[in-house]
Image: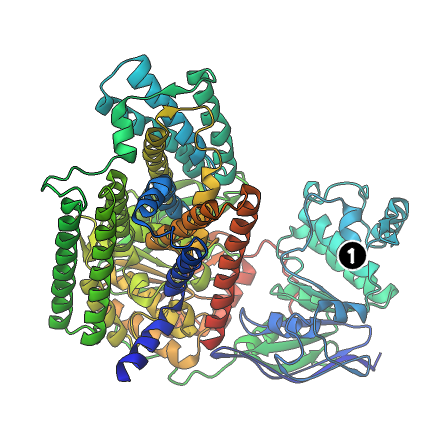
Amino acid sequence: MSINILEMVNITKTFPGVKALDNVNLKVKSGEIHALVGENGAGKSTLMNVLSGIYPYGTYTGDILFMGEECRFRDIKESESLGISFIHQELALIPYMTIAENIFLGNERAKRGVIDWDDTALQARRLMSRVGLKEKPDALVKDIGVGKQQLVEIAKALSKDVKLLILDEPTAALNDEDSSNLLDLLVELNQKQKITCIIISHKLNEVTRIADQITIIRDGSTIETLVKGKEDISENRIIKGMVGREMVDRFPRRVSNIRDVGFEVKDWVVYDPLDEDRIKIDHVNIKVNKGEVVGLAGLMGAGRTELAMSIFGKSYGKKISGKIFKNGKEISIKNVSHAITQGLAYLTEDRKNAGLILIDDIKRNITLSSLGKVSKNGVVNESKEVQVAQEFRKMFNIRSSGVFQLTGNLSGGNQQKVVISKWIYSEPDVLILDEPTRGIDVGAKYEIYTIINKLAGEGKCVIVISSELPEILGICDRIYVLNEGRIVGEMDVKDASQESIMRCIIQNSSEPIASGQ
Amino acid sequence: MDLVLRIKGAFRNNMRQYAMLIALIVIVAFFQILTDGILLMPRNVTRLILQNSHILILAIGMVLCILTGGNIDLSVGSIVALVSAMSAYFSVFLGLPVFVAMVLGLLCGMLAGMWQGFWIAYVKIPPFIVTLGGMLVFRGINNLILDGQTIGLPQEYVTLASGVIPDFIGGNGVLHVATIVIGVAFSALYILLSVVSRMKKVKQGFEVVDIRTFILKIALVAALLNIATYWLALDDGLPNVFILVAVLIVVYTFLTTRTIAGRHIYALGGNAKAAELSGVNTKKVLFWVYANMGLLSALAGIVFAGRLNSASPTAGVGFELDAIAACFIGGASASGGIGTVFGAVIGAFIMGILNNGMSIMGVSTFWQNIIKGLVLLAAVAFDVYSKSRARKSV
């Protein structure tokens, strides 16, 4: 039990402009269940991507020792061949193939390139019984539930003779019963079949239930490793480790000048666009005063982005109902351009895929949502456009060679300033900023906070969605806590702390709460 | 020396834009030599324009489709056929005045485009499938109307497609004076507009190109324009379709580069999601791009029917492929968001000169197809290569 099956030593991984991992150390004992916890973006998944070879050797620094030997994986195949299997949060199954075909995908039971279907079915059945999956091997993956699909993934890992199984948020999409079964299975695999597991999870009750050791990662560094039996591994203790960082002047000061209610959403209900019976936003009520910055806190998948996008011209969801009031008057918003003319702006969390046109230059991106303002009779006045772009470039210090530089060549922080410029140029009264500082460095974050303060100072209603609790606490006046599509808490920033927000989320989860102490 | 360096610099920055132009010049020079000078004889230049006018018109519409996200329209050849049959139906069977018949023909093409635009934009069926369906449907309607026969058309169609402008100034039989006057007038207009726009930019403190480069550029364009009109004046004069195509190029270049509608087309192809979240009505854009493609196909149909002097069941077969190839040779990106009307026009000319040059040389059509295919592949491969190099240098 005491031998380390895996040692990751001083792993450092940088993305352009951001240090995602900073000298991370991780030791996993043979035969244990090791949990990795941390906030969104702390670096858990990045670390596992390094381990499994998704980020190949050479793109990071540091050493990986697996079963005592140094490994330099160039791709996933190499790590898999040594017995490391990584099950991602988004399952990598092919829906229109059968369970058996999926289990042996890339690892087909074949002789000289010809698949032996009998052997495939036989072996699949054997593996399925090991994970307790009661289905026919020739059932299509799309026809079985998410919980069973998760089992197929595990069976697939077992077929490759796995020694170390990594699971990223395995229960995120599962209901209570499926989650519980899955955890039981992991414990069983671990104890009877001696498979070492690393589990990444936000659900601390699950972590405390099954983990032997818990490593806490924060801001790309390992903070501590807690050992079951030796140390206190209660949820409160873990939360403290996850969020406990000092905050010295990471946020510019602002004197709040909060006026009357400027924006209000009442009884907002949204259903999943893919499954119209599944409620995503459940009777949400929020209001924002002029000059106020309101935070929306919650875990990934809590429905924050869905709420924002459904408000912003119904760009998400089906069967949307509820009322929106601006300056006390009810407004109806049919589509995005309608939302923009009504004075709304939404800064997407997915800057590269949904925020910018990377093959276009800075000026075109800035004017895209308000082309009417730089044109006459439908003809764009390019010199005016350049002037506008140059003003924003100067005002927000967008570091670039000029307004004609393609946005694809800018750093994350400067890209974000371009998107913010776009929305400020549309002169909104209500701004919804979804993860405004995701993936950008500390300096640029400070600049963006300054912009947010300026907007609030001008009397605009600002809603900030962020997974970083310190950020929410640092820049907001008031905080709504969202969980599973419902508002589960509202607090003034003076009364809020990271612990209280986390507690609010966890206490309102439909998952049973494990006895803490 | 300084000037040379500066030109070289400007060249490197606009490498992709100029590459196609250079390719065109190289191909022209190549065939000029191989055909013993026949290629650029005034008579053949006129023929080149007449022969390729319909592909030019189609390529202008097609590049807009491709800009929206690499979407192509396979039905344009069949819409050409549909409209040529409709022209025969309105002007011959119903005996309507030719002008009315032409307007109705354009309307039919536009309706065909709107039909496809509806399925593509609002029902979200992939353009490839919708236009493949349209290709069969519209060809079928042509055959129904014509009952498999070829029908002759009134003289006005022929005049539009193959005629030249009248020499309203009165030439001496050798030179078509009106053509030269038009050339001079338009180059003067071009110079005037360039100077005014430059002065405006200087006044507003924008960066402008060096004055010598500027003069060199406008002098070159003006000279080319006048040589072209002089050349055509040596033959019968400016063909009507030349004016038609020139107007289309100017209008659509303006539309794509200077208007909100144009911006929305580029934005949709550059990143559909970002465009939608920025308030671009992406469905409307897609719908009108395809409606416009139908309209331009109809125009090409009328021109083509006029050139053949008839409506035929096989009109327009394979045109879609020529138009698509022209766009890609002209630098349009298969994933959308990149491409220009001017590029598509250059691409169409490259295709046309390949066709014409090889025909003069007596190369068999089998070989012509092989060579055209390889040129398309080489052009796109060059584009991919230069893009990957540009990315590395960033």
Residue closer to the observer: A416 or B321: B321
The quarter of the picture where residue A386 lies is bottom left
Subunit that carries the residue with mark 1: A
x and y percentages locating residue A11 in the rendered image: 64, 83
Number of labels in the image equals 1
- Asked if one can make out residue B283 in the rendered structure from this viewpoint, the answer is no
Is residue A491 shown left or right of residue A197? left
Residue type of the residue flagged with mark 1: Lys
Determine which residue is flagged by label 1: A156
x and y percentages locating residue A490 in the rendered image: 40, 60
Q: At x 21% / y 49%, what residue is drawn?
A: A378
- Asked if one can make out residue B314 in the rendered structure from this viewpoint, the answer is yes
Is residue B43 shown left or right of residue B35? left
Residue closer to the observer: B277 or B240: B240
Q: Quadrant of the C terminus of chain A?
A: bottom right
Q: Residue furthest left?
A: B169
The quarter of the picture where residue B55 lies is top left
Is residue B153 shown left or right of residue A21? left
x and y percentages locating residue B310 in the rendered image: 37, 24
Q: At x 47% / y 66%, what residue is drawn?
A: B387
Q: Relative to A250, does residue A371 appear above or below in the rendering?
A: above
Q: At x 39% / y 81%, what residue is drawn?
A: A443
Binning the other alpha carbons within 10 Å of mark 1 as few (below 14), some (14 to 19) or many (20 upward) gives many
Residue closer to the observer: A376 or B142: B142
Q: Residue furthest top?
A: B94
Q: At x 53% / y 71%, what residue is drawn?
A: A41
Q: Relative to A484, does residue A401 appear above or below in the rendering?
A: below
x and y percentages locating residue B24 in the rendered image: 40, 58
Residue closer to the observer: A291 or A143: A143
Assign a secondary structure to mark 1.
helix
